[in-house]
Image: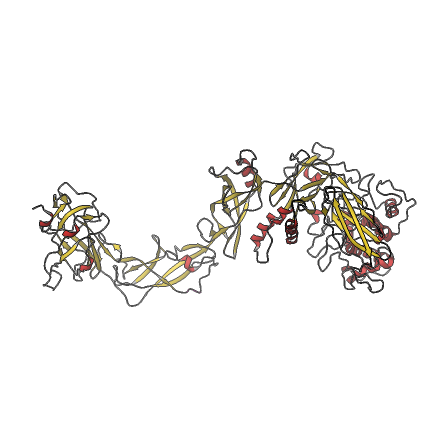
């Protein structure tokens, strides 16, 4: 009978197999079979077996396919729960053999078939059609096979096409394991026991939880012949465990709860277990807590054509990065050596005109992937690891600023005057109080102006000088941009003059060699600053080394040619007079306006206007402005009234309002004032932090040593007979202590550095130091010509440097510093008593409160010199 509704039953036999095999097609045209899987506690034990009393599940499978009807007879052992019957099958009746059961009321056979209403039964390969929960008989003989499901005499099934299929019977058994009482537990990781002789190897700083991760226990009976693996361990709080102890193997303890669900018998008390840990170096390849730092501050220029990047250029720059910081937690720091740099072949294309900064922050667009081999060494880290970094794109060029450089002498330094577009500065990141060290470094890189002169020597690094924009600079730029209009755009931001850190001769340049021309590169936040000629073409910023006759300062060059200077004129005024200094200035120079109102009048306003009619910002207090690249007309308006003094109008008699009695150099300033060697900027103001010009220092030295000139005529074109400083320069030159910056120039208005001031004073003292060894931390920065004189003044106690141990030879000397040094010499010259040791110690030229690194002036207000900063000061010879 082949009709769907007339089929009565198929005898079902569950075959005992050593592994589950799910048949996805019928075994033959007219045959099919059943397979099964036995599980306990979620684990497959079909081929493993279980001990008596273990709760198991028998999962019944049959070949995947569509069936019209299935019927089967099945003998079972143990308890069967009808709720576990599989999907799509109706439970009819269960029979359990009374071989292992006293329940004789249970019949002998289990049948299941399709509901006629459900139609065709679809069987899936990975889903059991019936799951039968059972318990392995407790009286089953150990190491024997116990029958779970006996084979019926036969079973039948019909395919979806009502074709009768023949069942292939087989027996179903499970091996019974013998349980045992636990005698001990052994810690195991992987395949190896964690013994004192074979401990777990971890790096320094590894916590106990991390160290014992993945360690389980294997249970053993008393003679070790029976084992039960993979039990969880509850670890004790091991206060004695030390993550830094590399001297010995450390023992840690725990306990194991035996639940009796596997081979071992359940216990009422936890079983103790021990493991052993050996702390050693931190392996950078395997320790997941290791953090490799970022690689910073390296830039390269991408190819400008076709938006591609030259791989060789990237690798050349990357190869300069030889190390990177590594850390674990907060207490373990080291350095890794980087080598074998490579560029990913899939990421070589960038947008055109780009510069990339190497970092391991993954960018979102326009980047190149770089790899390197990191190798550890030292007492903390070990191992080797391949690391990945990224080169990401920033704009290649900043236009709208300006660059001008001096032409130095052979032994001179390159200095650069730079302006940066206000909108570029306005976008720079501000450093906040909460920024950590890494964040501050990243922000600094984005707001630093870097001047580079390439060295011609392979063993000498390029010369560099830099300036970091401050938060105040950024605020001023933001204000300028917000106030700008289409008719009056924001003026560029002027950078203080930058001086590079190596002399031209040191870099391999010389006026007498082929290497006398040089090119300067300027970057702002890693992006190249460019300027264009009158035709709009980008031109190199270049210069030429001058012959070192007597210290030629040379002219300032811009784009390879002499810097253009622009006229500063004063519009005719009423009720007072006005002058400017200098009357011609290069872009970026500081121009000072001197306004003298008539009796009964005061200054109302000072305005400066460029040739195109736009205003130039004027410092209303100092009456100064920064020269633009344009001629400027200055207008000073006076009104009736009297100017309010900017300082205390009634200072103590013979005292300066800005030099308090407790000021660190007050005693020296007033000593020299009383001696007539120095004066104030005015009757009430000294300006202790102001700079000293060469002319002013000449007057101080001549006054200190009492030099007299036989003639007021000098051979310097910039020292005219009517100039206030010419007699002092003449006296100093005739005494052999003062020299010019060239045979025809003295540069009276240029500021003087600390090392040049020492050079002049050293010549005047006409002594030789007992030792030329300098104790300052930056002794290598002192010029060769100045070193003997700095050593002499240091040995005599006239200069002691700054609190951080540095001397800062290239910094301008301040008026207070100059007073300190000169007063020391003056006091020594005018006493016949051995100087008190306390006073000698007080001859430091460092401001205890934080010394300004510029230089002192000494002339009175009417003697004030031109302080334009467009003249490069050559070193004294």
User: Picture coordinates of residue 174 (x, y %)?
Assistant: 18, 54
Above or below, 232 against 302 in this view is: below
User: Picture coordinates of residue 66 (x, y %)?
Assistant: 18, 46
Q: Residue furthest top?
A: 514
Q: Which of the pair 386/432 is nearer the observer?
A: 432
Q: Which of the pair 336/770 is nearer the observer?
A: 336
Q: Residue furthest right?
A: 710
User: Picture coordinates of residue 324 (x, y %)?
Assistant: 54, 47
How many numbered marks does the figure carry?
0
In the picture, measured across the screen, residue 196 lies left or right of residue 114, that is right
Q: Which of the pair 304/435 is nearer the observer?
A: 304
Magenta segment's dominant SS is loop
Q: Which of the pair 835/437 is nearer the observer?
A: 437
In the picture, measured across the screen, residue 74 lies left or right of residue 666, that is left
User: Picture coordinates of residue 640 (x, y %)?
Assistant: 83, 57
In magenta segment, residue 814: no
In the picture, measured across the screen, residue 213 lies left or right of residue 96, that is right
Would residue 260 be visible to someone looking at this image? yes
| Quarter the C terminus occupies | top right
Q: Residue furthest left?
A: 1
Please give the range of residues in magenta. Answer: 237-242
């Amino acid at each position: 009978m082949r009709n769907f509704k007339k089929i009565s039953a198929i005898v079902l036999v569950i075959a005992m197999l050593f592994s589950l095999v799910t048949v996805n097609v019928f075994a033959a045209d007219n045959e099919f079979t059943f397979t099964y899987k036995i599980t306990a506690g979620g684990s497959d034990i079909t081929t493993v077996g279980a001990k008596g009393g273990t709760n198991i599940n028998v999962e019944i499978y049959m070949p995947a396919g569509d069936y019209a009807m299935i019927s089967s007879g099945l003998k079972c052992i143990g308890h069967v729960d009808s709720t576990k019957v599989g999907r799509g099958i109706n439970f009819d009746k269960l029979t359990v053999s009374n071989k292992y059961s006293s329940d004789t009321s249970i019949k002998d056979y289990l049948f299941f078939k399709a509901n006629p209403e459900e139609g065709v039964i679809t069987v899936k390969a990975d889903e059991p059609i019936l799951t039968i929960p059972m318990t392995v008989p407790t009286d089953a003989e150990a190491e024997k096979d116990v029958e779970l499901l006996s084979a019926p005499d036969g079973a039948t099934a019909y395919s979806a096409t009502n074709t009768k299929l023949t069942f292939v019977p087989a027996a179903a058994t499970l091996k019974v394991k013998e349980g045992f009482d636990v005698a001990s537990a052994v810690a195991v990781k992987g395949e190896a026991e964690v013994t004192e002789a074979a401990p777990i190897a971890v790096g320094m700083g590894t916590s106990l939880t991390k160290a014992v991760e993945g360690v389980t226990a294997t249970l053993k009976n008393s003679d070790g012949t029976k084992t039960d693996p993979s039990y969880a361990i509850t670890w004790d709080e091991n206060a004695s465990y030390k993550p830094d102890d590399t001297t010995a193997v450390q023992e840690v303890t725990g306990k194991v709860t035996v639940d009796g669900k596997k081979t071992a018998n359940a216990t009422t008390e936890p079983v103790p277990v021990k493991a052993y840990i050996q702390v050693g170096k931190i392996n950078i390849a395997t320790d997941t807590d290791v953090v490799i730092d970022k690689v910073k501050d390296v830039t390269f220029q991408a190819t400008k054509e076709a938006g591609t990047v030259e791989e060789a250029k990237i690798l050349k720059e990357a190869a300069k990065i030889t190390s990177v910081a590594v850390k674990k937690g907060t207490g373990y720091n080291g350095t890794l050596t980087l080598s074998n740099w490579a560029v990913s072949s899939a990421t070589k294309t960038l947008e055109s005109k780009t510069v990339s900064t190497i970092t391991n922050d993954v960018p979102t667009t326009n980047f190149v992937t770089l790899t390197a081999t990191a190798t550890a060494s030292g007492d903390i880290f070990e191992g080797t690891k391949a690391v990945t970094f990224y080169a990401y794109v920033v704009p290649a060029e900043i236009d709208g600023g300006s660059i001008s450089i001096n032409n130095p002498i052979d032994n001179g330094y390159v200095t650069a005057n730079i302006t940066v577009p206000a909108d570029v500065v306005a976008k720079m990141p501000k450093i906040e109080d909460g920024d950590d060290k890494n964040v501050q470094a990243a922000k600094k890189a984005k707001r630093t102006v870097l001047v580079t002169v390439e060295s011609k020597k392979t063993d000498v690094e390029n010369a560099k000088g830099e300036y970091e924009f401050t938060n105040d600079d950024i605020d001023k730029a933001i204000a300028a941009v917000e106030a700008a209009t289409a008719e009056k755009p924001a003026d560029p931001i002027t950078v203080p003059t930058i001086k590079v850190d190596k002399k031209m001769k040191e870099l391999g340049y010389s006026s007498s060699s082929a290497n006398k021309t040089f090119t300067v590169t300027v970057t702002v936040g890693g992006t190249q600053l460019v300027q264009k000629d009158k035709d709009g073409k980008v031109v190199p910023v270049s210069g030429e080394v001058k012959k070192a006759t007597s210290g030629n300062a040379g002219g300032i060059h811009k784009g390879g040619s002499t810097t253009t200077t622009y006229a500063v004129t004063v519009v005719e005024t009423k009720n007072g007079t006005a002058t400017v200094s200098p009357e011609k200035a290069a872009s970026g120079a500081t121009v000072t306006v001197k306004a003298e109102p008539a009796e009964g009048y005061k200054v109302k306003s000072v305005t400066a206007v460029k040739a195109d009619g736009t205003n130039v910002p004027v410092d209303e207090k100092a009456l100064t402005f920064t020269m633009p690249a344009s001629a400027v007309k200055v207008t000073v308006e006076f009104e009736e009234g009297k100017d309010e003094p900017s300082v205390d109008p009634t200072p103590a008699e013979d005292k300066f309002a800005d030099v308090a009695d407790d000021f660190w150099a007050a005693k020296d300033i007033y000593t020299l004032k009383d001696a007539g060697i120095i004066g104030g900027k005015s009757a009430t103001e000294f300006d202790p932090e102001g700079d000293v010009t060469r002319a002013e220092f000449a007057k101080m030295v001549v006054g200190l040593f009492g030099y007299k000139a036989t003639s007021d005529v000098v051979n310097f074109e910039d020292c005219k007979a009517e100039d206030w400083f010419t007699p002092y320069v003449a006296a100093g030159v005739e005494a052999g202590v003062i020299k010019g910056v060239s045979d025809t120039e003295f540069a009276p208005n240029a500021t003087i550095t600390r090392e040049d001031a020492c050079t002049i004073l050293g010549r005047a003292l006409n002594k030789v130091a007992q030792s030329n060894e300098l104790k300052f931390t930056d002794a290598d920065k002192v010029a060769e010509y100045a070193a003997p004189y700095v050593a002499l003044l240091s040995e005599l106690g006239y200069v002691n440097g700054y609190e951080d141990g540095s001397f800062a030879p290239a910094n301008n000397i301040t008026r207070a510093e100059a007073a300190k040094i000169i007063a020391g010499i003056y006091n020594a010259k005018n006493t016949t008593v051995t100087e008190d040791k306390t006073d000698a110690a007080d001859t430091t030229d460092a401001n205890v409160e934080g010394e300004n690194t510029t230089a002192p002036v000494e002339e009175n207000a009417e003697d004030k010199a031109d302080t334009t900063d467009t003249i490069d000061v050559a070193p004294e010879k």
